[in-house]
Image: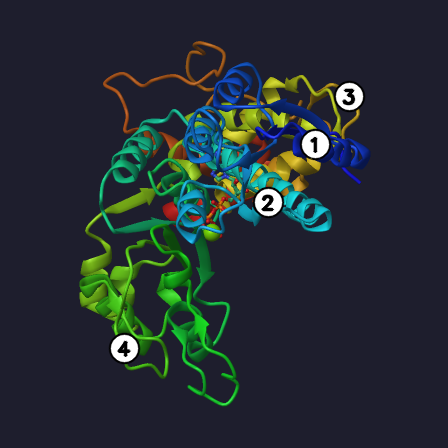
Amino acid sequence: MANGEKILIVEDEKLIRMTIRELLEKEGYRVGEAANGAEAMECLHSQEPDLLLLDYRLPDTNGLEILKESRRLHPETGAILMTAYSSIDSAVKAIKLGAYDYLNKPVKHDDLLATIAKALQTTQLQREVARLRGEQKRDYGITNIVGRSRPMLEVFNLIRKVADSSASTVLLQGKSGTGKDLVAKAIHFSSDRADKPFMNITCSAISETLMESELFGHEKGAFTDARQQKKGLLELAKDGTVFLDEIGEMGLALQAKLLRFLEEKTFMRVGGSRDIQVDVRVIAATNRNLQEAVASGEFREDLYFRLKVIPIHLPALKNRKDDIPELVAYFINRYNKEFRKNCQGISDEMLNCLMNYDWPGNVRELKNIMERAMILETKDKLDLDDLPEEIVQYDGDRSEGKPLGGTGQASGSTGIVLPEGGVSLKDAEFELVRQALDATAGNQSKAARLLRISRDALRYKMKKFGLN
Ligand SMILES: Nc1ncnc2c1ncn2[C@@H]1O[C@H](COP(=O)(O)OP(=O)(O)OP(=O)(O)O)[C@@H](O)[C@H]1O
Ligand SMILES: [Mg+2]
């Protein structure tokens, strides 16, 4: 049964018009009528039907003209052409102009209802696809990448440049959790390829043989299991983007084939003998140092050079700590929505602690920590006790944190004095770390707390200064 979809019947014979109207209304459609071209145009200018039922031959024009105008005004309105003169020619023209189908007159009622139902379903699917595309553009666009630190501004700049360009290869490098996935999608969805497919494959997840057939496809009989010909991602992503994640894990043989594709834009399916040409942009990502992989013979140098023509480096979070407050606000907003919470922010102590931490897992780690805190928290402000022990080493009592270096004249709130003639900041840091360890008899947790840094950060500094 219909859902009250609006159908406009354009038909000059009154009897046919009335009969169809009755039929459709019984089915639950809302029906409009036009007896000629002029009336049809008038209707199209004042309303947007879901479907047009068009007679080909009209007193003042023909159905194709109305179809054209309808496509122009309402690209999402479907159309079915009815014609008495089974003319293939006009039917073909109608389909080319975007009609869904055509029916020969006199139309059988069952055929008509079935065709209308299918046409409406197709239109609905097309609308759905358009809506999802819009949503994807919004959800994966560049605006979903948070950051204002200088290195991130540089990243945004590159994303925009690359997206607009015809560059066919991009290399994303950065440690785990720095946002490579996010950037790959942002490049695709802010480029003119956005309406074409974005295909994603992780090179480490599957065997090399499987990977090859996933990427390039295979012909029937290419290997035991190849019962059917299959298109690979490169073909499926035609005119779009293929994202090759963890490219550093790709085997050498496949690397050679990928290089050929990047250089010649052609490839063969596995077991095939025909060159296939496609235009896709390849975005490769890795958290490995590819230069080292080249040095150790695990990665082809020629492929590395080909990939790194346009490199985008995603900086580790510890090198752009200015982004932390904004990221925190972003995740609070996001999890407020997701968990229906009303969190208002975090305490200064918690922010200090997050700023001091070194984030080996980068933004992903921060995101996980915020998620955890938000799930557990019921107060409207997050505090140190919402953070995991490792990050804060917090035991509810910070009072033992005496000012350090207290022998000289206290200045400011820290009690630290700048010696006359200055001091190397590194030496000062060394001295403070050493004193903190002294004061706590080498207890790292306590020393870290005295220095308001995480235990990991302390260990790192101890290693740096050879204080083990
Ligand atoms: N700048 C950012 N703004 C907002 N969210 C971010 C940002 N960077 C990363 N994230 C989020 O952090 C998580 C990890 O990011 P992503 O998956 O893109 O990292 P990755 O570099 O691909 O990591 P891996 O090497 O482990 O695959 C994701 O949930 C992502 O949405
Ligand atoms: Mg990733």
Dot 1: few (<14), some (14–19), or many (≥20) neighbours within 10 Å?
few
Report the Cα–Cα distance between label 3 and label 1.
17 Å
Front in this rendered view, residue 419 or 224: 224
Residue at image mark 1:
338
Residue at point 67%, 40% (across, down): 389
Considering only order in the chain, which callout, 4 or 2, is on the residue closer to the N terminus? Answer: 2
Report the Cα–Cα distance between label 3 and label 4.
65 Å
Residue at image mark 3:
379
Report the Cα–Cα distance between label 1 and label 4.
50 Å
- Across and down, in percent, residue 22 comes to 77, 32
Question: Circle 4 — which element?
Answer: loop
> As shown in the figure, which amino acid type bears the numbered disc 1?
Glu
Considering only order in the chain, which callout, 2 or 3, is on the residue closer to the N terminus? Answer: 2
Whether residue 451 is visible, yes or no, is: no
Where is residue 428, by image quadrant? top left
Residue at image mark 4:
274
Question: Circle 3 — which element?
Answer: loop
Front in this rendered view, residue 444 or 294: 294
Left or right for 429, reference 124: left
Residue at image mark 2:
122
> As shown in the figure, which amino acid type bears the numbered disc 3?
Lys
Label 3 vs label 4, nearer the camera: 4
